[in-house]
Structures are given as C-alpha cells and as structure tokens.
C-alpha cells in the first residue's frame, strides 16, 4: 500500500483491508487498500490507496481526518494518471473544514495552486463515496431521519470543475434494508444489507464497514473486502 504520509509511532491501529474488484466472475487488477488509525484523543485518520495502474492508468491516494464527533476535518487527495494523451498527470487537492467555511487548495501538475473558500453550515456532511470504504458512512447518514435538508459537501476531482459543491440531501437513496449473514471466503459475517436506487447493494458489518458492494445496475462490477482486520 502507498501513502501520502506513513503511519507515525503515536498512531493506534483500528482497522485495515483491501477491496478487490470483480468484473462478472473475473478478478481484475484494481485494488483499494486502506488503513484506519486512532490519533490524538479519539480522532481517526484514514489512508486510502486506489490502484488502477493496471486497469485504467491512474491512481488516487487519500487521507481523511475524522474528529471524535465523527466530523470530517481534513481531506487530502492526490490523483495521478499516465499517458502522453492525458491533459494533466497530477492533481493534488487539500480540503480543510473549519467552523464556518472549507478552505481548498488545488494544484495541477507544476502550475501555481488555486485557493478557494466555501461557506458551510455546522451540520455539514462530507460525501466521499468515490472510496468504497466510505460508502458505510453515507449509508448510515442517509438511514437517519430528516436528511432531506441536510447540507452535503460533494468534492470534485477534475480540473475543469469547481473543487466542490454544497447540495441539500444528496445522499444515497435507500430502497430497502435487511439483516443478512454474508459469506466471504471461509468466514460468515452478520451484516445489514442496503439496496439503493439504481440497484447498488452494500453489506455493512457491525462497524459500518462495507464488506461487499455490488455496483449500480449495468456495471456487472463487485467489490469484496479482503485481508480485513478490526480491533
């Protein structure tokens, strides 16, 4: 697994795993590896490595700092792609969520960085469903009552777009849920199965971690969590 910053000595391990992707019944070479550590007095630092170098010539590394109150405080994302036909090769975006605004720094290749500030509400939810691991947080938030007016920050990862936007209630639409035992390899896990609009199906364990994701209708794509450890 690759990191933006390596794990420091004062961090306490919480969990880790690797999502493997299947196209139909065929295992692809795409992987999403991640770790979760406790830092400070109960905050969580999540590191993610999305490795599509062999399936799509791109990679994305991320760090997400979440407060003890389960509020996203910082997101750092480095997107890299190879190929002479690409309009850019590196895109680095840093989001710092303060009390009244999010401060965003974005840099494309060796260009001068752009700075943006967007006003936010105290109850803002940060939607990060480009990462399989963080589908759990979005589903649990969506399952809570009265999310239709919830301000949701959606980050964008392309230079031709703004770095992010605030929308109301933009969370996965849950159509049904059920308690299910899920078999992965030689193990069985008690889970809550969520089906969302578009026929995406996600199984969450007791920690809110997605163990399996069947992507939306028409993709024939499944992601299964392997090498999973949780204290």
Image (spheres, helix red, strand yellow):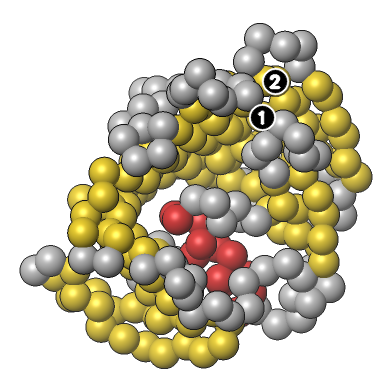
Q: Is residue 214 above or below residue 154?
A: below
Residue 117 spot, x, y in % from top left: 87, 34
Residue at left offset 52%, top offset 35%: 63
Residue at left offset 51%, top offset 56%: 134
Quick check: 100 left or right of 128?
right
Residue 162 seen: yes
Which residue sits furthest front?
85
Residue at left offset 21%, top offset 55%: 27
Residue 52: numbered disc: none
Quadrant housing the N terminus? top left
Taking depth in this image into account, of 126 and 202 the one nearest to the observer is 202
Taking depth in this image into account, of 128 and 28 the one nearest to the observer is 28
Q: Earlier in the sequence, mark 1 or mark 2?
A: 1
Q: How dense is the environment of label 1, judged by Cα within 10 Å: few (below 14), some, or many (20 and up)?
A: many
Q: CA distance from mark 1 to mark 2?
A: 7 Å
Quick check: 107 left or right of 168?
left
Residue 87 spot, x, y in % from top left: 63, 24
Residue at left offset 36%, top offset 32%: 53
Taking depth in this image into account, of 18 and 69 the one nearest to the observer is 18
Q: Quadrant of residue 180?
A: bottom left
Q: Dot 1 corresponds to which residue?
A: 93
Residue 113 spot, x, y in % from top left: 76, 17
Mark 1 and mark 2 in contact? Answer it, CB < 8 Å.
yes
Q: Is residue 11 above or below residue 18?
A: above
Q: Dot 2 corresponds to which residue?
A: 107
Residue 13 spot, x, y in % from top left: 34, 41
Q: Quadrant of residue 225?
A: bottom left
SS for dot 2: strand
Quick check: 86 left or right of 153?
left
């Amino acid at each position: 697994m690759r990191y933006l910053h390596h794990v420091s000595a004062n961090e306490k391990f919480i969990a880790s795993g690797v999502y493997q992707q299947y196209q139909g019944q065929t295992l692809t070479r795409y992987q999403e590896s991640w770790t979760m550590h406790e830092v400070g007095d109960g905050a969580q630092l999540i590191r993610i490595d999305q490795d599509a170098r062999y399936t799509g010539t791109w990679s994305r590394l991320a760090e997400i700092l979440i407060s003890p109150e389960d509020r996203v405080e910082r997101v750092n994302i480095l997107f890299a792609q190879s190929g002479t036909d690409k309009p850019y090769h590196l895109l680095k975006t840093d989001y710092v969520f303060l009390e009244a605004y999010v401060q965003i720094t974005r840099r494309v290749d060796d260009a001068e960085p752009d700075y943006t500030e967007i006003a936010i509400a105290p109850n803002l939810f940060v939607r990060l469903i480009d990462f399989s691991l963080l589908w759990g947080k979005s589903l649990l938030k969506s399952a809570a009552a009265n999310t239709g007016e919830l301000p949701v920050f959606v980050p964008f990862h392309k230079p031709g777009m703004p770095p992010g936007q605030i929308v109301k209630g933009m969370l996965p639409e849950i159509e049904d849920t059920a308690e299910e035992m899920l078999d992965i390899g030689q193990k069985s896990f008690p889970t809550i199965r969520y089906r969302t609009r578009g026929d995406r199906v996600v199984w969450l364990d007791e920690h809110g971690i997605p163990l399996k994701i069947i992507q939306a209708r028409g993709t024939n794509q499944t992601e299964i969590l392997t090498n999973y450890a949780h204290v």
